[in-house]
Amino acid sequence: MDLDAASRTPIVAMLLTLSGGFLDAFTYVGHGHVFANTMTGNVALLGVNVATADWAQAVRHIPPLIAFVFAVFVVHVLRLDALARSVQRPAMVCLLLEIVFLAVVASGMIRIPELWLISGISFVATLQTLSFTHLENLTYTSVMTTGNLRRGAKRLLEGLIPHYDGAALRDAMLLGMASFSFFAGAVIGGFSTGSLHDHALWIAVLLLVGAFGRIVQLARHASVSA
């Protein structure tokens, strides 16, 4: 099992989606009702704020959208042949970058202005979701849940109608687990941010370190067994 195969396991997906839900709740509760990951929510809230002429709040939703687009650009560049040979294991590099950034914020060693904090979280979270795209043989997202719910519901119906399909039901279970993990992460993020504020990010750091460690552990175990 290589690192890519190890990153597709259910436990890794669960840890990543827990952190995804956590980060959305963290920025929404603790930093001005702005989503870190859910760009659909940011666009919708931006539209509402523009409609109500709440310009100060509307502006807050723009930086994470810019950070999202920039992260897409960075991942695209990392996958180009010219860089692919020099940047080994870009997915793990992106995950490590996310861990370091969140740890710096959680520690309070460097005071980051809120504008840059939210944009930074959006950037590293987007790197995460673009780098880890598969749960076993399924495509999924670790920082949003709409697509997971849609695909999970579709596979559930395919597993029951017109006849029983065990493989489809297993897919539905996996995608349901990812969706619930996002929800659970949001609950944890909502509770912890209210009491710990930025220090609550240590929880997200632990989740991501757990995912990183699990990927490495599975890959090493597979190489030793081989």
Image (cartoon, rainbow, N blue to C red):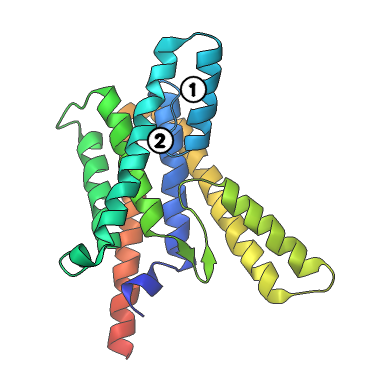
Looking at the image, residue 23 sits to the left or right of residue 173; the answer is left
What's the residue at 40%, 39% (across, down)? 23
The percent position of residue 29, horizontal first and vertical second, equals 44, 25
Q: CA distance from mark 1 to mark 2?
A: 14 Å
Dot 2: within a 10 Å radius of its alpha carbon, few (fewer than 14), some, or many (20 or more) residues?
many
The foreground one among 15 and 37 is: 37
The circle on residue 46 is 1
Number of numbered labels in the structure image: 2
Query: Image quadrant of residue 116?
Result: top left
> Relative to 101, is 42 above or below?
above
Looking at the image, residue 164 sits to the left or right of residue 143; the answer is right
What's the residue at 68%, 70% (across, down)? 168
Farthest residue, direction bottom: 226
Residue 18 in sight: yes
> Relative to 46, is 69 above or below?
below
Looking at the image, residue 192 sits to the left or right of residue 136; the answer is left
The percent position of residue 64, horizontal first and vertical second, equals 37, 32
Type of amino acid under label 2: Ala
What's the residue at 34%, 28% (across, down)? 63
| Label 1–label 2 contact, CB within 8 A | no
Q: Which element is circle 2 on?
A: loop
What's the residue at 34%, 67% (across, down)? 215
* The N terminus: image quadrant: bottom left
> Relative to 172, is 75 above or below?
above
Q: Nearer the viewer, mark 1 or mark 2?
A: 1
Disc 2: which residue: 36
Q: Which element is circle 1 on?
A: helix
Residue 194 in sight: no
Sequence-first tag of 1 and 2: 2
* The C terminus: image quadrant: bottom left
The percent position of residue 78, horizontal first and vertical second, equals 25, 58
The percent position of residue 110, horizontal first and vertical second, equals 15, 30
